[in-house]
Amino acid sequence: MTQDKNKSMQSKEPLSSSAAEMISNDISLTDELVVTYLQDHPEFFNRQAEFVTGLRLPDHQRGVVSLVERQLSQQRQKIHNLEEEITQLMVIANQNEQLFALYSDLYLRLLDCSTAEELLDCLHLATTQLLSLDALKLWLAKPTKVEHNSIVDSDCSEIVESKLSKDGYYFGRLQQSEQELIFAEPTQGSVVLVRLTHHDQDIGFLAISSRDAEHFDPRMDTLLLNQFKKLVAKLLHQQLY
């Protein structure tokens, strides 16, 4: 009985320093463990209010700041970012409104055209003056007797196969040989190719160039262009064939 009691008393004795060190070495304290503990014990901050108030964090601009100052700084940055996003959205909305008004006016002008030449004159004017772009060209899949400086005489069927076989648009840069086929000279900026079809009949494509290399980007929205190409394809089909 006495031996059992001694064993029990011995078991309650504190661990030696070497034993405690062995246990602590088995558990490696990591950022993840600290974060998990704080998430599981949110009352920690209530119990350690003085610690939280006096906590100082390194800041690359101001040296050392309090936790409250860090939180206020982060909130100010979030507000600043939101204000910039709102400003950008307002600019984009204003640009879209102007484009919508321009396209609406262009549609009315196109509908008033009585010949293919007038139609191409209107398209060229809208492209180079109203939209401030560099050039507009039209390649037709079938020969036509219509003469206009916007019509491409070269055979561009390979460009259709390589750039427009899967999609109705191509945005970006062209190879120099492709530029010369369409525009008769190299272009330094970006282009958009718009494939024109009417009732499953392939009419050709419009090529519009910009001196800005970033103007025509594959991420561009095509909502207005979809309406534009349908109307142009229909009117060209009526005037040419």
Image: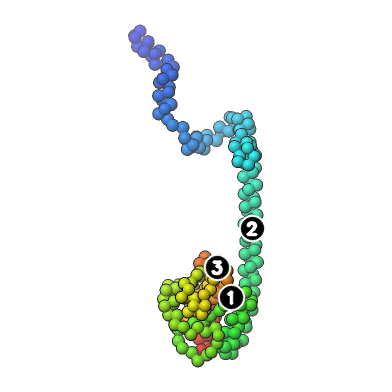
Label 1 sits on a secondary structure element that is loop
Q: Amino acid at mark 2?
A: Ile
Sooner in the amino-acid sequence: mark 2 or mark 3: 2
Using the image, tell me which numbered label, if any, was put on residue 213.
3
Q: Secondary structure at mark 2?
A: helix
Q: Which mark is residue 86?
A: 2
Q: Residues within 10 Å of mark 1 (few under 14, many from 20)?
A: some
Residue at the image position 56 percent from the left and 32 percent from the top: 44
**Mark in the foreground, 2 or 3:** 3
Image position, residue 148 (x, y; %):
55, 87
Real-space Cα separation, disc 3 to disc 1, in angstroms: 12 Å
Query: Amino acid type of disc 1?
Result: Asp
From the image, tell me which residue sits under label 1.
134
| C-alpha span from label 1 to label 2 | 31 Å
Going from N to C along the chain, the mark reached first, 1 or 2, is 2
Q: Is residue 111 visible?
A: no
Residue 147: x and y in percent read 53, 89
The tally of labels here is 3
